[in-house]
Image (cartoon, rainbow, N blue to C red):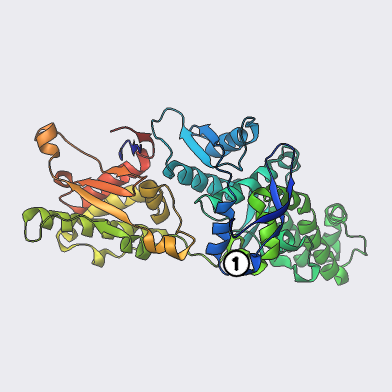
Amino acid sequence: MCSMYSYRTFDEMEVIDLDKKTDGTEICPKRFKGHEETKSVADVVKSLTERVDENGIFSICVTRDQMLERGIKQWQRQKKSSPKHPLRVSFIGEAGIDNGALRKEFLTEMMAGIEKRFFDGGDNGKNPKYSMTDLDKHNFKTVGEIFAVSIAQGGPPPNFLMQWCYNYISTGEVDQEAISERDVTDPELIQLIKEIEAADNTTLMEFTDRILSCGYTGAMSTQRKEDIVRSLVLHSTVRLLPMLQQICSGMKLYGLLSLVQQETDICRQLFVPGSFSKMDSDFLVKSLSPVFSEKGTMRHQRESKVVNFLQDFIQDLEDEEGGKNNREDMPEETKSEDEDIMKAERHTNNMNITVGKFCQWLTGQGHIPLSHSEREGFRIIIEFDHDCQVRYGTHHSICYPVVNACSCSVTFPIAHLSTYVEFKNIISQAIVHGFEFGRC
């Protein structure tokens, strides 16, 4: 049974010599038979998916508020099951039954939260934050487990790590020669390096204690700035090794760590930025599959108009993310409503709706599928409701789109979407306030 949102109502990978902890939460294949046949990310995902133990369920029940912290807490306190089993998610107070969409939505939110909460950096990659508190609570191990579950069970990949972090995970060693200032992501250390590079002999002495605490033991002079900065760079990375080690411990789930060590180049795409593009308007629009009425009818004309609105809405979201505003591309009938359009755009911007967020609202996931076959088969069914005025009377004020995330379908109320402004306002409200699952 699949419920709706409120506004949307090894046979080939035989494992030899398992290193399995007594609590059953980690499975680390020492060697994969036939791993040389792994040729793509899709093969990696397939092999991990086959390692999910179907003889049980790993249930997580959380509220949508503080989902990351609550999700980690519930993840760690499970006593009757472990993440080696299929993940099933339920949201407290919602009637949704997890047939896959809730799991993908949970993993999408958790991965975004993990990136923000546990990592520092930018678009070129991120390092774990230096946190002995999180290390002591084994939170980084949980992060590693969530990495494995997300890759194996339909969530987004953790493709935000610095290159040196991935190299350490895949080899167990730090390549000191490959580490540079670009790999420093701690804001305080970045600022300290800038201040040292700009200092003279007098001001340099003001940083003596901070420099010594980073492990530098040479002379304190401007002639040694390069050595001082180099010590700070190495300090900024070496001190993160316990966090990375704990992440590696969690990644033993499904044998992910072993597979990364065996298929380093292929698996790199899952962990380092640059291999996967984020959800964009081109992919999403191509995935739309409208169920039109008979051509030539008034219903078909109205449905085509709504589909055009939907395409414009998706493309506007992408333009707004990039700071663009292509008003020329809007439908002719909406150009005279310039003031209303600008108001609707400001409203949408304030809601922080993105193309990925919109896709997540429709399907539970905000990322482009990892494998070619999944991308080719990704479809969003568009249906149309022409009869809400018959059911509710001609004087009812509003109806919202109804989404069935499990079947990746959405039904639009035609009577309430006669202009682009109406469409944009209604669908924006539905996205922001309608993530909860409920029965129709």
**Residue 47 falls in which quadrant of the image?**
bottom right
* Residue farthest front in this picture: 11
The relative height of residue 371 versus residue 245 in the rendered view (above or below) is: below
Position of 439 compared to 235: left or right? left
- Total count of labels: 1
Name the residue rendered at 52%, 46% in the picture: 107
Name the residue rendered at 35%, 44% in the picture: 431
Give amino acid for label 1: Thr
Between 113 and 122, the one nearer to me in the picture: 113
Percent x, y for residue 96? 39, 34
Between 69 and 42, the one nearer to me in the picture: 42
Q: Residues within 10 Å of mark 1 (few under 14, many from 20)?
A: some
User: Tag 1, which secondary structure?
Assistant: loop
Residue highlighted by disc 1? 38
Q: Is residue 22 visible?
A: yes
Quarter of the image that includes the C terminus: top left
Position of 428 compared to 17: left or right? left
Q: Is residue 64 visible?
A: no
Name the residue rendered at 67%, 55% in the picture: 15
The relative height of residue 267 versus residue 4 in the rendered view (above or below) is: below
Between 366 and 147, the one nearer to me in the picture: 147
Percent x, y for residue 133? 73, 39
* Residue farthest top in this picture: 93
Percent x, y for residue 168? 74, 61
Quarter of the image that includes the N terminus: top left
Percent x, y for residue 416? 17, 44
